[in-house]
Amino acid sequence: KSLSDTPPPRRPFCRVTQEDLTFFRTLLPGRAITDPDLLESSNVDWLKSVKGSSEVLLRPQTTEEVSQILRYCNSRNLAVNPQGGNTGLVGGSVPVHDEIVLSTALMNNILRFDDVSGILTCQSGCILENLSLYLEERGHIMPLDLGAKGSCQIGGNVATNAGGLRLLLYGSLHGTVLGLEVVLANGQVLDCLSTLRKDNTGYDLKQLFIGSEGTLGVITAVSILCPQKPKSVNVVFLGCETFEQLLKTFQLSRSMLGEILSAFEFLDSECLNLLRTHLKLHNPISDCPFYIVIETQGSDSNHDEEKLHNFLEEAMQSSLVVDGTVATEEAKIKALWSMRERITEALTHDGFTYKYDISLPVERIYQLVTDMRQHLGERAKSVVGYGHVGDGNLHLNITSPAKNPALLAAIEPFVYEWTAKFQGSISAEHGLGLKKRNYIYYSKSSQAVALMGTIKAILDPNGILNPYKTLPDNLR
Ligand code: FAD
Ligand code: MLT
Ligand code: ZN
């Protein structure tokens, strides 16, 4: 197995010619970009960990334009990298070599919103936060929320099957996405843009594209079921002495908060140190080994506050938590959420970050952090754990002053073997992209991977869509 930061060799795609550029410039006047300065940010990922060398950035506005681009690229054997907000964390969103970048940034129109059903239909380039603001004015919210909301796009969210901070209550995009419009590699527009809650007419094709990371088609429009805006929201920040107590607090919250529990997130004291050192955020409670962010969403503030009060009383009395603070008004809610949402940003200031996004039986998730710390000893700068306890999803992050192949060799495959030993997933929510593609076998059987290859070959026989991503190198 190759190390995850070794780029695979270029496949024999054609190179973009002057004739190709003339075609793109005629199709997309002023929106076929070749200026290297403008291309710079499209060639580098959010983590600044991988860099491509694309010389062409296309910015279509309509599905028809996407269709014409792909039909042309497919006939010319030109590779294409679909790109949304470029906030992906596995090197999937930027070219590896000279793939053409197809950005959905200008496909940002909201097409319809039905405030009776709560179904929103929009183009795929709409920024998540803009959709949230639009919906909030209409008494609804998006069913997903993540720290990258200001930049990531709904198409990118669907393409990665992003989980985020609210999955515990509203479920995954496999449930909330009702329909998709997708342009296939040959330019064919696949209209599965249903707005029905129930539709069992044949195979549910849209599911194939949710989490396909731009390798099976370009998502051009999304219809999604949006919940009512909750009338009451509370956030609590709690401290625990041990991870066992944190898990017991999770159990208690499930039983005492029930249907209003919308998030149960955690961070360890190392994360808090990073927030303090690099972002100057201060701990709102006393220092503890572990911290919890709990959010409740409900329709009756008296009812929710009473439930929360009883839960907190019980958690304190039984010594599960040692300190805590509650927020009901917006500014404090935001401040408490920052302690969890801004860890990703704090890590970028700590050094080069090796990121692992692991699903495990929930009672095991912190053991991986402890074992990794012991395994690496002095070799790492920081080894931190945070994540979505409610979803059994650990984010294990390891930093080093600079990119460090010896450290990487110590982390991988250790981390994947550890995960496979407990039947976990080596990618809970970020996808495989470039970095994790060759580790897929730790979580999927060879038959399953081979079938993925068959599906890829049917939908994209020339392999032009996001090559070198998601599927392992040995499939080609
Ligand atoms: P990009 O990064 O541009 O692309 C991601 C992948 O999708 C690429 O493979 C790309 O080719 C493909 N793609 C993009 N748009 C399309 C399209 N229209 N059609 C087909 N393929 C497409 N993820 C979580 O799951 N949960 C989190 O809580 C979370 N928090 C984050 C917090 C921060 C600060 C950051 C930087 C990232 C976070 N992420 C999280 C990672 C997450 O994958 C992305 O933020 C988001 O879902 C990607 O959307 P994007 O528009 O930026 O897509
Ligand atoms: C998160 O939950 O904060 C995101 O998935 C980003 C990350 O893992 O750093
Ligand atoms: Zn996450």
Image: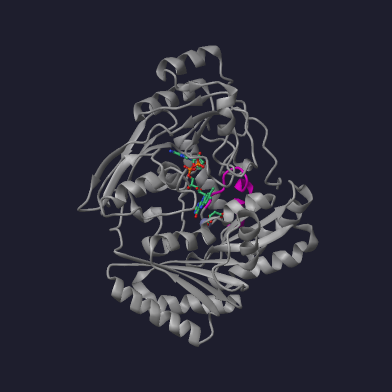
Residue 247 versus residue 202 in the image, above or below? below
Instruction: Determine the image quadrant of residue 383.
Output: bottom right
Q: Nearer the viewer, residue 382 or 32?
A: 382
**What's the residue at 60%, 27% (across, down)?**
98
Left or right of residue 238, residue 297 in this image: left
Task: Return the residue nearer the eye: 392 or 265.
Answer: 265
Q: Is residue 273 above or below residue 111?
A: below
Determine the image quadrant of residue 445: bottom right
Q: Whole-percent x and y of residue 276? A: 62, 60
Q: Which residues are magenta?
A: 430-443
In the rendered image, residue 262, in percent from the top left (x then y), is placed at 40, 66
Q: Is residue 442 magenta?
A: yes
Q: Position of residue 452 (x, y in %)?
A: 50, 46
Residue 290: x percent and y percent? 59, 71
Left or right: residue 41 versus residue 69 is right
Judge by depth and name the residue closer to the eye, 286 or 194: 286
Q: Is residue 378 within the magenta segment?
A: no
